[in-house]
Image (cartoon, rainbow, N blue to C red):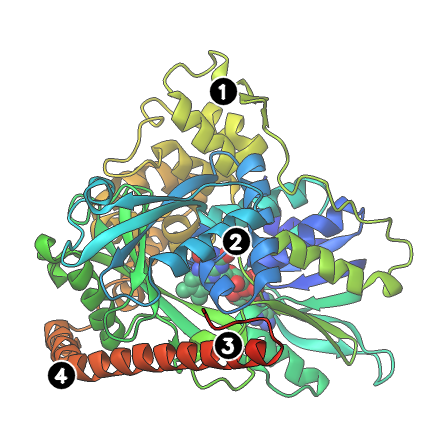
Amino acid sequence: MWGTGWRDEVWSQLDQEWDIIVIGGGITGAGILREATRAGLKALLVEQRDFAWGTSSRSSKLVHGGLRYLKEGHVFLTWTSVQERDRLMEEGKGLVEPLGFLVATYKGDSPGRWTYEAGLSIYDLLALQWSHDYYSSEDFQMLAPHLSTKGLEGGFRYGDAQTDDARLVLRIIQEAVADDGTALNYACVEALLRKDEKNGVAGVVLHDMTDPPRAPAEVRAKVIINATGAWADRLREQVGASSRIRPLRGSHLIFLAWRLPIAQAIGFLHPIDRRPVFIFPWEGITLVGTTDLEHEQALAEEPHITPEEVSYLMAAVEAQFPSLNLTLDDVTATFAGVRPVINTGKVDPTKESRDHVVWEEGGLLTVTGGKLTTFRVIALDVLKAVRERLPEMPELKRDAPVLNPVYVEGRSLEPLDEGACPELVEGTCRRLLGRYGAEAAALVEAANRGELRAIPGTQTLWAELRWAARAEGVVHLEDLMLRRTRLGLLLPTGGSNVLPEIRAICQAELGWDDARWESEEAAYLALWTSAYSLPERAAIPDWTLSLAEVREQRIAEQPKRRRRLLQRVVSTVVMAGLATAITVVYLRGRGKVTRPS
Ligand SMILES: Cc1cc2nc3c(=O)[nH]c(=O)nc-3n(C[C@H](O)[C@H](O)[C@H](O)COP(=O)(O)OP(=O)(O)OC[C@H]3O[C@@H](n4cnc5c(N)ncnc54)[C@H](O)[C@@H]3O)c2cc1C
């Protein structure tokens, strides 16, 4: 798709009147590009770094309704999300896969069993399915071995889904490009071209971020869409709008699956602040996340986990899996992302809404907030908002599949499962079709001998690296290691041990000489160390102390809690007694209650 010379070709075509320019190559921008091309619009997407470089490669990778959002009263968001989840699971097999979720209930927990039962029933009803069940303590331990059993009463299991977020973005962009869309990574919008106050924005000034850079280009379009997520305020300022984004950071820890073995996701309340935290299996590793904090690091820099966040997440793991004795030596990688949340000034960041917004300001349309899961709905909302400025746009096909079909009734349309590739087992075919869509067959064909094997410790094939280097717009080694493949997250030390093999496959495909490879390798390893590994050990607060403090506090509060419970019981009994007495007096007054003779 993006072979040799593709960037020159795209730059040479920029000088034309586009219908839409989408700024931002995350899931939001990708979704808009896809729906715009489906509507036959001439659409261009530009991304300042790599496709999915922003939050869309740093999410928790869940395609979900969000039980938490239900608890906060966002019923519509949850309903939309579960509908989209089910649609994506159907259309994106091999990329969006079902994932079981477990929620343990412990003695004295709040919320307790019946609150969860009510929440999960509503959750299932919204999806028109019944996926949850309650298990006794013994059965629950079979589902989640190693889980803390102290006070365990039992737990629920329900169904959601997960994906590879960066590959989801890539697949959508690639399908939009196959449908006559245009997408360019490492192209940053530094300024907006203004018509005048009344007529708004006429285009963008685009800077090439590759080395050596081409001269900046002025690119014009009827509609300019700002889909830059946490960075949205930077462009909004240029049309005189005031800042409204509250960047909130969420970080994760990564463990090798054999050290923190779980077969399904486990959700629980953090022992310190009672926020929901998840531990889940993904691509053969185990993720623990997430935090939700004001992001005070510069937005231009790669976000990274702080020592305090490491301690917070380790405390969660320790409290939930005490018998595993996990230490910092077991953490193989970390990553952090920034939520583009709309600032309504809530004291607790977790309480800010996660819904999306579409703002029209001085001719610039900004879309931000929202979730990975709901990208299609967001894209359709955006196109609806620009209809007036694009009167020739046909009616939007709201029911069209968002991912091109590659499976028909469980069978692939591509020749992958028809004997063309006997080396691949069915699960691998499904995975390739999900991730690469119509390009999967070409990927397999491009593989050299032995490259259809998985890289040890992962499900990634060596052939995926060759294909990415050849045809997926890789500009830097980090694109290949962190987003086209996820080896930088899946392998210890960012996959440094397999870099010689990767070089043997990819250097020639990328057209890099030895000096370029070596500088790319050094830059990638420096980036991995600063943003994807643990911070300085000495700076990480001892989480066992925080846990001990919480335990002591709980013990100290026990008499107070008992007193409060007793007060509640007494006042309920008194109120019930009073109500009965009043009813009896009232009814006797009306002659309906008679004294026994
Ligand atoms: C820790 C965490 C966990 C999450 N987990 C989930 C989850 O499990 N499920 C779920 O559904 N959602 C989840 N989300 C939410 C979801 O990830 C985000 O809502 C979504 O990825 C935002 O996508 P976006 O395209 O709007 O922003 P981004 O992905 O950030 O994309 C914006 C892009 O714009 C680019 N850009 C910025 N300025 C310019 C410019 N001037 N020129 C060109 N390009 C520019 C940036 O480089 C960036 O790549 C999570 C979020 C976080 C932070």
Q: Which residue is mark 2?
A: 122
Q: Quadrant of residue 190?
A: bottom right
Alpha carbon separation for disc pair 1 and 3:
78 Å
- Percent x, y for residue 540? 17, 75
Which circle marks residue 334 in the picture?
none
Q: Earlier in the sequence, mark 2 or mark 4?
A: 2
Dot 2 surroundings within 10 Å: few (below 14), some, or many (20 or more)?
some
Dot 3 surroundings within 10 Å: few (below 14), some, or many (20 or more)?
some
The residue drawn where x is 85% and y is 49% is 395
Relative to 359, does residue 126 appear above or below in the rendering? above
Camera-side residue: 463 or 394?
394
Secondary structure of the residue carrying tag 3 is helix
- Percent x, y for residue 103? 32, 53
Alpha carbon separation for disc pair 4 and 3:
43 Å
Mark 3 residue type: Val
Mark 1 residue type: Leu
Alpha carbon separation for disc pair 3 and 2:
38 Å
Q: Earlier in the sequence, mark 4 or mark 3?
A: 4
Q: Which residue is mark 1?
A: 416
